[in-house]
Amino acid sequence: MQVLECVLFDTEFTAWHGSKQRNWSENWEHRELIQIAAVKIRMTRDSASILASFNELIRPTINPQLSDYITNLTGIEQAMIDEMGVDFASALKQFHLFCNQGDIPVFSWGNDLSVLRQNCELYSLQLPDFQRGFHNLQMIIRNLGLQGVEQSSGALARFHGISLQGHIHNALYDVRSLAATLDMWLRKRALTIENLLFTEGR
């Protein structure tokens, strides 16, 4: 039986009202990560199951005070960051370890790799080697013509009528939503492991 183990990951980063429309163009705006979350999943021909979860809050340093906008969007409060947040370097190291030190394919709903790279530049760090590559799952699904491709990862489960508890735009909820939707697509034979094995790299 063909099996694929991979990681689904998502990020949340500092933002203010209008940041997205401005593309973070103000000189004080930066996409500083405040959360990296991921699930390691095992996919077979007809299902996807979660093997392990990763969730790390990160303390931003350029703009250490979270905006009301990002708190309302993600549910991540300042006290949570202050009490449980780690520095980006530590979070990146732990994420790399969670991804079998890069020896497992990593997928995101969109190009979250760009945010990792931006934060490495902000903090003068080298991105660790992810030799199995980062892959844009949203692009794969778009090429397959499946419904829901324009939804955010967190909105996918609700769009497809899948019951899931949590806060949309919290990265851990979003990757669980994505995993549940992958499971649904596999069960309906709308998606195959082969669709994911032959994807673009970084």
Image (cartoon, rainbow, N blue to C red):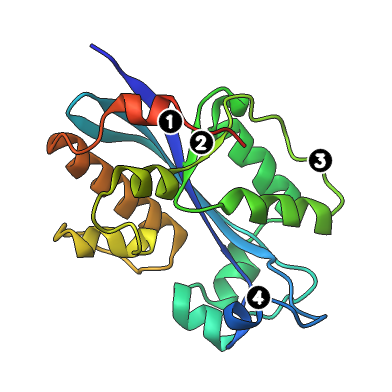
- Residue tagged 4: 23
- Looking at the figure, which quarter contains the C terminus? top right
Quadrant where the image shows the N terminus: top left
Which tag, 2 or 3, sits closer to the chain's start?
2
Task: Give residue 43's position: percent from left, percent from top.
Answer: 29, 28
Secondary element under disc 1, as helix, strand or loop, is strand
Q: Earlier in the sequence, mark 3 or mark 4?
A: 4
Q: Nearer the viewer, mark 4 or mark 2?
A: 4
User: Label 1 belongs to which residue?
Assistant: 6
Q: Earlier in the sequence, mark 2 or mark 1?
A: 1
Question: Is label 2 in a helix, a strand or a loop?
Answer: strand
Q: Based on the displayed image, in which of its 4 quarters is residue 165 positioned?
A: bottom left
Q: Is residue 102 left or right of residue 89?
A: left
Three-letter code, disc 4: Asn
Q: Which residue is mark 2?
A: 106
In terms of secondary structure, where does tag 4 sit? loop
